[in-house]
Image (cartoon, helix red, strand yellow):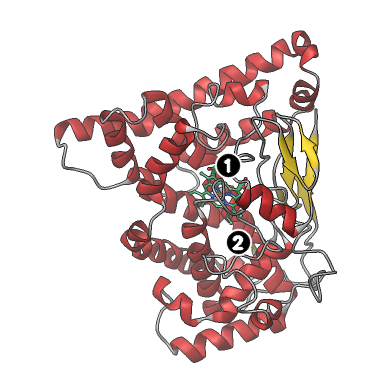
Amino acid sequence: MNLVVVSDPKLADEILHTKGVEFGSRRQNMVFDIFTDKGQDMVFSIYGDHWQKMRRVVTASFFTNKVVQQYREKWEEKMDLVVKDLYRDEKASVEGVVIRRRLLLMQYNILYRMMFDMRFESMEDPLLKQITQLKTERTMLGKSFQFNYGEFMPILKPFLRGYLERCRELQSRRLIFFNKYSIEKKIKALDRDKHNINCAIDHILEAKKNGEINEKNVKHIVENINVAGIETTLWSMEWAIVELVNHPNVQSKLRDEISNILERNPLTESDLDRLPYLQAVVKETLRLHTPIPLLLPHMNLEDAELNGYTIPKGPKVVVNAWWLPNNPAWWKKSEEFLPEQFLEEEGGTDDVRGGRVDFRYLPFGVGRRSCPGIILALPILGIVIGKLVMNFELCPPEGMEKINASERGGLFSLRITNHSTVAF
Ligand code: HEM
C-alpha cells in the first residue's frame, strides 16, 4: 500500500485546500466496506456527488449557527445538571469522581436531543447502555489486529472469514438498533403530523422523502454522528480538565477571567467571545492533545502531483495534524500546556472557527473534508470547561499531586490512558 505522510504546513495546505478535490476522497477497505455498506455513509465515502449530497443534508440539519442558537440553552441546562450532581455527590470533593462518566451522559443527551429529541435519565438507562455497548464492540473490531492485516494484505481474506462475519453481524445489529429505537419512531410521528419538524432527524427524513438520499443513507448518517460526535468531544473535555488540574496557575487565571467578565452571571454560549483566555485553554488542549492526530486518511482517486512527486492513485494520505502544532521549530514551548501561546499569536493563527487559516494548527482539518462538528464542539467545550472552573477548584484526589496525563492511540485517535479521577 502506498502511504503518504504530510508533516509540512505548505504541503498540508496543498492536500487539504489547493488540491482539496483531488485529495478529498477516503480510502476504502474490506472492513469499512462492511461498516459503511460500500460507501453509503458520509464520513468514509469518496469525494463526489454522493458525498456532496450527504454533506449538504447533514450540514443543514446539524451544523449551522441557527441550530446552535436553537439548542444552546438546552446544552447549558445539561451542563448545569452536571454541576448540580457534582455538588450533591459527597465523594466528589475528597476521593474524587471519574468525571468522564458524567460527561458521557451529558454529551449523549446533548447530541440525542439535537438528533432525535430524546433524553437519557442516567448512565443506567438501558437504551444508553445498549448504545455504548454497541459502540465498544465496534471500536474493538476496528482496532483488531485482523483489521490491519485485512487492510494491508487482502490476499489473506480467506483467513478473515470469521472476523468479517462478526463485523457484518455487528453492523447489522447497530443499524437495526438505530432504526428501531430512533428512526422508526420519528417516521411514525411525521406520518401523524408532517409539520412536526423539530430535530435533525426530521430534516434528514424530509431529504429522504424528497429523494435526495435513501433509507440506507439515513441510517448511516445516524451511525456517523454517533461515531464522530461523542468520543472526540469527550476526550477533549477529559484532556482539558486534566491539564487544568495539573496547572493550577492556568486554572486560577481562567477563573479570574470568567469572574471579572461575568461577575456573578451564569456562563452562556454568547459570552464565549468575551473570554479569550477560556478560548485559548480550549485551543491549547486541542493543540497538545490533538484527538485525531492524523486526521482521517485522505486519498486521491487519480494519479496526482505533490511537491514534485507523482502520487499514484489510491494511497493512504495522512496529514500529521499532531506534529504541525507540536513541532518545536514553529511553537515556542511546544511541549508545555501554555494557553498564552494562543494569546501572543492572536491574529497570526486561525481563530479555529474561521478567520485566517494557519496550517500549523489543524485539530479539525480544513477544507472540504474538514470537521463540520467544529461549530458544536468548540462552544460545548468552552461552556462546560468554563462552568466547571467557575463552580469548583479542580484538584487531584487526596494524596496525589498530579494526574497521569499519558496517552494511548486508537484506530484514528489519541486519548488519555486512564479515565481520570478528579476532585471537585
Ligand atoms: C471529521 C476532528 C467533533 C462530525 C473530522 C476530522 C477531524 C475531526 C480531524 C477529519 C478531517 C479530515 O479528514 O480532513 C474532530 C474533533 C472534534 C470533533 C477534534 C471535537 C473536539 C465532532 C462532532 C461532530 C463531528 C461533535 C458531529 C456532531 C464529523 C464528521 C466528519 C468529521 C461528520 C466527516 C466529514 C467528512 O468526511 O466530510 N472531525 N471532530 N465531529 N467530524 Fe469531527
Residue farthest to the right, as pictured: 329
Say which residue label 2 marks.
237
Q: How far apart in space, not on screen, are marks 1 and 2 (Cα)? A: 32 Å
Instruction: Describe the element under mark 1 as helix, strand or loop.
Output: loop
Say which residue label 1 marks.
21
**Quick check: can you spot residue 373?**
yes
**Quick check: can you spot residue 291?**
no
Looking at the image, which is closer to me, 354 or 169? 354
- Measured along the vertical axis of the image, is residue 155 above or below residue 314? above
Looking at the image, which is closer to me, 344 or 69? 344
Tell me: is circle 2 under 8 Å from ligand 1: no
Q: Quadrant of the C terminus?
A: bottom right
Q: Is residue 3 left or right of residue 164?
A: right
Q: For marks 1 and 2, give the one nearer the viewer.
A: 1
Residue 156 pos. (x, y %): 80, 13
Instruction: Describe the element under mark 2 as helix, strand or loop.
Output: helix
What amino acid type should be assigned to the residue bearing mark 2? Met
Residue name at image x 71 percent, y 78 percent: 341
Which callout, 1 or 2, points at the residue further toward the start of the chain?
1
- Measured along the vertical axis of the image, is residue 182 above or below residue 155? below
Residue name at image x 59 percent, y 54 percent: 366
What amino acid type should be assigned to the residue bearing mark 1? Val
Quadrant of the image occupied by residue 240: bottom right
Quadrant of the image occupied by residue 363: bottom right
Residue 163 pos. (x, y %): 70, 17
